[in-house]
Amino acid sequence: MSRAFTGHPLFDTSRYLEDLSDFHCHPSVPRFIESLPLPATTLRQDYEVSRQFLLRYCDVAGTFTRFRSEIQRFLNYLWVIAGRTLSQTDTEVVSAYFKTLKTPPESWISPGVFAAFRGSGTLRTPNEAWRPFALRSKEKNARYSASQASLNASRTALQTFFRFLVSRNVLLSNPLEEVRKRDRKAKASLASDVETEVRRLTDWQWSFILETLTDAAAQNPRYERHLFIIVTMKSLFLRVGELAPRPLEDGVLRTPVFGDFRRKVIQGEEYWSCFVFGKGDKARSVTLPDAYLPYLRRWRSYLGLSGAMPEQNERNPIIPSSHGNALGKRQIQRLYEQAVMFAVDRMRDQDFTEEADQLEAIRSETHYLRHTGASQAIESGADIRHISEELGHASAAFTESVYVNSDQARKRIEGRSRKV
């Protein structure tokens, strides 16, 4: 590693998190701990309690990745720059950390996103290119700039982490509670874009994916599952975990079943909805678009189920495995990625090389479907309050700020039509 950077990656992917209990696959980590001018025993305790915290989120890929990145960065700052341990973390330390988040040392910034560790088998070595901060812009002479969204994400991760430390008696109180809001506010930048980038597919990308999978399923029934998963996640604004079994807070395993689709009649009109258990065991009801119903009927026909539409209290899993059990989250994630790559390959066959590269870069990010569905619904005139409820958000303001850009789209369309 560069001499100027004296930190070290600390946590590998969730696959290796159990192995880090004794470092038998990661010998460089204890060597790094021993090299610091702080009590090694205390630092090992800091490390272990942090690992225990991350273990709680191993089954939630997106959350684990965000929390791992933040805790790894915070511990590097705490041990290397602040010269403190977790039990010595106070408001002053956290305030200084947020200033570092906004203006990190140059040697702590990598020119791109790199994995923390490399290697396979029984030995994992630190990636010399890894740094706690990553420059994501490809522009020449670009400088690191922390967005308000990234600072908010840091605050959320640390808030959860500090509460865990309080519960484990590592801290007496949460030091983040007293940090001034202005210390957590991003610096104004004339070079930054004032508009929030919405992580969604373009209309053309979505149409291409849908057409590709529809044609594939017509030619080979094995793609019916891919088609149904993609259409359902996009049309009903679902997270990948909301289609798979998962334990609730009381320990009971909750499996999405066809009985979750429910027929209702309001003012003489029939409509269908889907009952969904979201994050934090929060339940919500999502209306099924009329255009979605043929896909649901098609899926049931493929499965050989009786009745074109689900019956009340039907217990068949919505996404069954070949053995009749429900597919797990990772299996559904894998099918999603296969479906996206099928579209990517077709794009390349048709010489849409740049578009294929863009789609391949986000092949594992399932939330793009949820964002796309919400954005398209509001851009088509749906009430943002209703979409917010079906997304499971606490407020319509949050939905508008994070998931949709209908106002931006209207502004750009109107701007393009202005006369010179």
Image (spheres, helix red, strand yellow):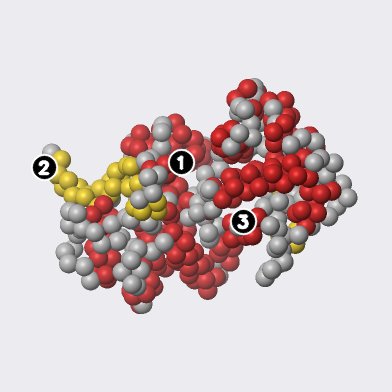
Residue at position x 75%, y 54% in the image? 29
Q: Residues within 10 Å of mark 3 (few under 14, many from 20)?
A: some
- In the image, farthest residue toward the right: 3
Say which of 150 and 311 sits in front. Answer: 311
Give the residue number, with chain letter if any, for mark 3.
17
Q: Of discs 3 and 2, which sits in the foreground? A: 3
Residue 376 horizontal side relative to residue 10, left or right:
left
Residue at point 11%, 42% (across, down) = 268
Q: In this view, does 146 lie to the left or right of 129?
A: left
Label 3 – label 2 distance at C-alpha = 55 Å
Of labels 2 and 1, earlier in sequence is 2
Please give the residue where the numbered disc 1 appears in the rendered image: 404
Mark 2–mark 1 distance (CA, rounded to whole Å): 32 Å
Q: Mark 2 points at which residue?
A: 268
What amino acid is labelled 1 in the image?
A: Val
Amino acid at the residue labelled 2: Gly
Q: Residue 188 sits in which quadrant?
A: top right
Q: How far apart are marks 3 and 1 (CA)?
A: 35 Å
Q: Along the line of sight, which residue is nearer the eye, 45 or 111? A: 45
* Foreground residue among 326 and 383: 326
